[in-house]
Amino acid sequence: MKPAPFAYQAARSVDEAVALLDEHGSAAKVLAGGQSLMLDLHYRRTRPALLVDVNGVEELVGHGVDDGHLVLGALVRHADLERPVVDDPVGALLAHVAPYVAHPPIRARGTFAGSLAWAHPAAEWCAVAVALDAEIGLHGPSGRRVVAAAEWFHGPHRTDRTAQELVTEVRLPLLGAGTGIGFAEHRRTHGSFAFAAAVAAVGVAEGRVAWARIAMANAGPVPVRATTAERALAGQSVASCDGAVSEAGAAAAREADPRPEPHGSVEYRRHVLAVLVRRSLRQALGSAAAQVTRPPAGRG
Amino acid sequence: MEVTLWVNGDRYRVDVEPRDSLADTLRDDLALTGTNLACEHGVCGSCTVLVDGQAVRSCLLLTVQCSGRSIRTVEGLATDGELHPLQAAFAAEHGLQCGFCTPGFLMLFAGALEHDPRLDHDERRLEETLASNLCRCTGYVNIRRAVLRAARELRGEASPGE
């Protein structure tokens, strides 16, 4: 099908975009990467009166580091993250996850912030945001506000954003040296939506897990943070934490709220989530260990 | 809305609706029907064209977003009646059967090889790029061979067996 008719305005600034959104409210949709919105328009699942194109808004381009955070402008494309954008494990994590997001031509257009605004339950970036306690920056008619990822997702395709607001940036805390990162996903074919996925970051100090952050994609209506699993790992010795990793996987699966799908019962989905959480944790523990500087050889 | 497009080096002024996709404008307004449309939601890649050198799905881009941009389609690949090395390689390696997906694959790899002329040395990236588009006839083996041959040809290297 072809989209139903709509009007089109290319905004030149954040203020101009917000003014248009303020005027038109829920009748307007923001067009950034458009790689999900366009197909919903084709299906006529959404019929906006106006598209506000923000691709020409310079303020939304690029990334930087500010106050201990990697700041991604709303026009940072998935493809921009395929190589680490910052010398911190968070850059490595984004580069590790990026190839799981669709195909190269889609990644050239789609945006990180747009994925969070779209809030698909299977989206990898949404799980990353929840795992890392990202903050979503918005501009609206009454100014700027920042929303924690934990408060952002209200349901499938529902977020804390009001129709008058524009997502302008996403802030991801830098993880610091000694943090290991991991990501594991199961899907039916390359480029399919995640059947399930798990993202992990583990802080290691003096051979012990100082903290762990775990989130799962397509494990419920919104990304699920596995806090019980995180607690099960804290304080464990890295050298002998196989049991704790297994227990964390099982705990995460219990914390998930998966729905039955034609290709997977709830039991199967929980099983896969447990496996993926364990895999992501093993990756994270391995990458943390690889960062530990070995003492210089010599003196017997 | 009046929009100026640069397609294969030619300037066009077209009057489009905001809802018109770039693919529809190319086919219906400019009569450049080499760009094929199949799924119209970004899955199949038949409509892949280059916009400012980047391979994108022209079904997921509005024409009004392309004002002033440089677009390349399969019609612009051959020069003076001579096939582009990718086209010659697809013919030599039987990289097509029904041919419906071919313009999309050609533009996908025209962009990818311009971006990274040594794409054939990056196994993961090559596989991933091949998987971006759907072909239902050839099973990808010959398309892959064609891409490898074209990559060598574009670098001025002789193909094995020649």
Image (cartoon, rainbow, N blue to C red):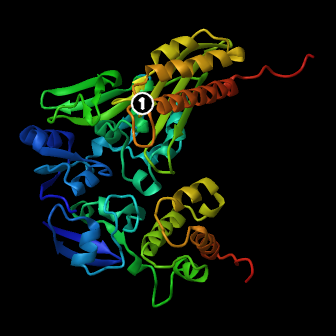
Q: Residues within 10 Å of mark 1 (few under 14, many from 20)?
A: many
A278 vs A208, nearest the viewer: A278
Extreme residue toward the left, this view: A23
Subunit bearing disc 1: A
Residue A170, placed above or below residue A256: below
The x, y position of residue A234, in whole percent, is 57, 11
Q: Is residue B130 left or right of residue A285?
A: left
Amino acid bearing label 1: Ala
Q: Position of residue B101 (x, y in %)?
A: 44, 72
- Quarter of the image containing the C terminus of chain A? top right
Where residue A118 sits in the image (x, y, percent)? 29, 40
Q: Is residue B126 positioned above or below A24 on the image?
A: below
Identify the residue at image location x=51%, y=72%: B137
Q: Look at mark 1 in the image and give the residue it sits on.
A: A219
- Dividing the picture into quadrants, the one containing residue B89 is bottom right
Instruction: Check disc 1 and report its element: helix, strand or loop.
Output: loop
The N terminus of chain A is located in which quarter? bottom left
Location of residue A113 by image quarter:
top left
